[in-house]
Structures are given as C-alpha cells and as structure tokens.
Amino acid sequence: MAVSADPPSQVQVRLFAGLREAMGWSEQLVELAPAADATPHQLWRQLGLQPAHPPAGVRVAINQQFATWDASLAAGDELAFLPPISGG
Amino acid sequence: MVAIQLEAEPFEPLHALAEWHQLLAAELGMLPAAESHFVGRVRPSDANDAPLTALELEHYPGMTEACIASLAAAAAGRHGATAVLVRHRIGLVLPGDAIVLVAVAADRRGPAQRCGQELLEALKHDAPFWKREWSQEVGRWIMGNTPL
C-alpha cells in the first residue's frame, strides 16, 4: 500500500532592503509549528526579527499581495516583510 | 490600457512617450485629446545635502509590477482615463537621470491630471520600491518619501 507523506509545512520568508541587511539574510524556508495558527506576526517573533515588535511602516505580503499581520499562513505560502516603501 | 515597464538601464522619457504614442495610435486610431506627464529625476544631493553619487532602487520582482499595474488600472478606472503609462527605474540611478515616468491619456485635462497625480502618490506609498542613497561610498536606506 502506498503511503503518501504529508506535504512539508513550510513557508518561504523573504526580507528586503534595510531589513534584509540588518538581519543578514534575504530568504529562508521556515517550518510551521504543527497545529499552530501561524501568522506574519508570529513568524516575525519566531525568526527573531528586530525590533521584537514590528515597527510602524513595516508591511507584510503573502504570495506577493499585501496582507495583515494577523493573517493566517498556509504551507507553501511566500511571506515577505517589507520595510517602509519609498518609490516614485 | 495600462503599459508598465521596469527599467534596469537609463531611459529617455521623451523616447518612451513617443513609443507610447505609437502604441496608442495603433490601438485607438488617434491620440486622446488630453495628456498629463510626470518625470521624476534623481536629485544631486542626499537628505543631508551632501553630494549624491547614485540612488539605488530595489524592488520585489513580480509583486512590484503587479502592484503598479493594479494601481494604474484602479486610478484610470476612477478618473475615466483612457490609457496609462508607467516606466520606473530599478538598480543604480545617477543624479539627473529619470527615475519614473507617469503619463495619462484621457478625453479631458482634468481626468488626465488628477489620475496622474493620484497614481504618482500611490506609487510612492503602495508600490514596493526601496531607495538607498549612496554618498561618499556610504549607502543609507531612505525611510519614506519626500514631501509633496
């Protein structure tokens, strides 16, 4: 009997600009805790991003769309923490 | 009609407008009656008034393009504009070089100007770009935008 393994419960986390350079990495796969309701805010803390409380102006995107800090994350999502935007 | 392009190399806004006009004329038969244009260029000095070597523009590949397209389509829809062009530099941009070109075509000057103004502000606040000023071989990330 074939046994299918559960898909890995991982989220790809990406950092940009000053946040990336402050932390010293640009992206990594992060394992979601089993049965946990993972959110961007939770992963910010889990990854030890600084400061401990996300500063005003830092935004999050899930699968390249702006999202809220308490949005639910699912396996396979791409989560990005975006420092204050300065385009145009 | 929304045309978006991120430019990794210097571009000439007037040439970009000429190309856009050709595209519009081919699609619409003739050019709309009104157009607004905005060209943003790199200042020669940084936030501390020191000479600026270059401005670096980082973006989020995929999301940035999608955001610009969405913002442009929404602004055009709100103002009844016929067509929008956005060209935006990425990478290292030298003082005096164009960073952004926003052009709007519409039936009347009001919608063209209002749409252009609104879209430019939206780009500054809601399109994922980050600027770093390089001066005397030191880079400093800019937090936020210059005043309107």
Image (cartoon, coloured by chain):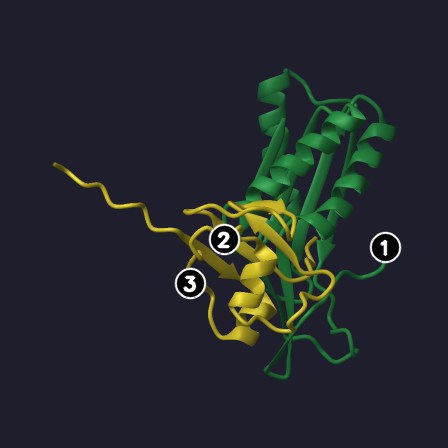
Chain colours: A yellow, B green
The residue under label 2 is which amino acid type? Ala
Q: Quadrant of the C terminus of chain B?
A: bottom right
Q: Dot 3 corresponds to which residue?
A: A28
Q: Nearer the viewer, mark 2 or mark 1?
A: 2
Q: Dot 2 corresponds to which residue?
A: A36
Q: Nearer the viewer, mark 1 or mark 3?
A: 3
Sequence-wise, the earlier of marks 3 and 2 is 3
The residue under label 3 is which amino acid type? Gln
x and y percentages locating residue B67 in the rendered image: 61, 42
- Towards the viewer: A79 or A2: A2
Q: Which residue: 73% across, 51% down?
A: B125
* Circle 1 chain: B
Report helix, strand or loop for mark 2. loop
Q: Please tell me how many numbered marks the rendered image carries.
A: 3
The answer to whether B80 is drawn above or below residue B46 in the figure is above
Question: Which corner quadrant of the image does residue B59 belong to?
Answer: bottom right
Q: Which residue: 62% across, 31% down?
A: B2
The residue under label 1 is which amino acid type? Leu
The answer to whether B65 is drawn above or below residue A44 in the figure is above
Q: Which residue: 51% across, 68% down?
A: A47
Q: Dot 1 corresponds to which residue?
A: B148
x and y percentages locating residue B111 in the rendered image: 83, 28
Residue B38 visible within the image: yes
Label 1 crowd (10 A; few <14 / some 14-19 / many >=20)? few
Question: Which corner quadrant of the image does residue B103 belong to?
Answer: top right
The answer to whether A40 is drawn above or below residue B134 in the figure is above
* Circle 2 chain: A
Report helix, strand or loop for mark 1. loop
x and y percentages locating residue B6 in the rendered image: 55, 48
Q: Which residue: 33% across, 51% down?
A: A8
- C-alpha separation, residue under disc 2 versus residue under disc 1: 44 Å
